[in-house]
Image (spheres, rainbow, N blue to C red):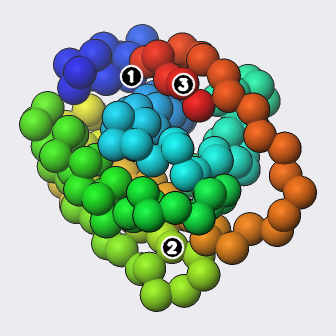
Amino acid sequence: MKEYLAELVRSALTPAHARNLAREYLQARLLGALQRAGAMIPLAFQGGTALRILYFAPRFSEDLDFALERQTASYNFHAYLHAIRRELTGEGYTVMIKVSDHRVVHSAFVRFPNLLYELSLSPHHDETLTIKIEVDTRPPSGAGLTTTLIRRHIPLHI
């Protein structure tokens, strides 16, 4: 899969487009890992990235936002992050995760150090591509939920 990402960014029209493609691909990969870890049972995908991935909105967003829709014992933020790390590390990515889960909104920064340099998207070894994941554990009530199957770099059932 890391080789696919390298091919994807090489096909980009501009350096900015290549960076956006890399981020969007990794967002899809994080969503896939979360899906396989069971996170999509208690969580609803929302926000700007959801609009882009699900409805092809032209707006580019940098983070993955979720709402905890079902107060169940199955919600385990740390287990979901561990699944992300395990899956992507197994494919050769270096993954660092910084977690903050002591407030209503649980957040994590999933960092990919050196990846932009490896992909020739940055001349700096130390530049890090980061994707933020946020889970609102007390969202307002009344939201509508729907499930869909999409293909955005990988098949996702969200």
Identify residue type, mark 2: His
Q: CA distance from mark 1 to mark 2?
A: 31 Å
12 and 48: which one is in front?
A: 48
Residue at the spot of label 1: 9
- The image shows residue 150 at horizontal and vertical percentages of 59, 17
Quarter the C terminus occupies = top right
The answer to whether one can see residue 61 in this image is no
Quarter-wise, where is residue 118 in the image? top left
Q: Residues within 10 Å of mark 1 (few under 14, many from 20)?
A: many
Q: In this picture, is 111 found above or below 156?
A: below
Q: Amino acid at mark 3?
A: His
Classed neighbour count for the residue bearing mark 3: other residues with Cα under 10 Å, few (<14), some (14–19), many (≥20): few
Q: Residue at x 44, y 64 (%)?
A: 73
| Residue 120 x %, y % | 27, 34
Q: Position of residue 132 (x, y in %)?
A: 48, 60
| Circle 2 SS class | strand
The disc, 2 or 3, on the residue closer to the chain's N-terminal end is 2
> Marks 1 and 3: in contact by CB < 8 Å?
no
As drawn, which residue projects farthest toward the front? 73
Mark linked to residue 60: none
Of the numbered discs 1 and 2, the one sitting upstream in the chain is 1
Which of the two marks, 3 or 1, is nearer to us in this view? Answer: 3
Which labelled disc corresponds to residue 157? 3
Closer to the N terminus: mark 3 or mark 1?
A: 1
Between 6 and 34, the residue placed more toward the observer is 34
Residue 141 x %, y %: 84, 64
* Residue nearer the viewer, 146 or 46: 146
Residue 140, placed above or below residue 89: below
Q: From the image, state whether disc 1 or disc 2 is nearer to you.
A: 2
Q: Which residue is mark 2?
A: 106
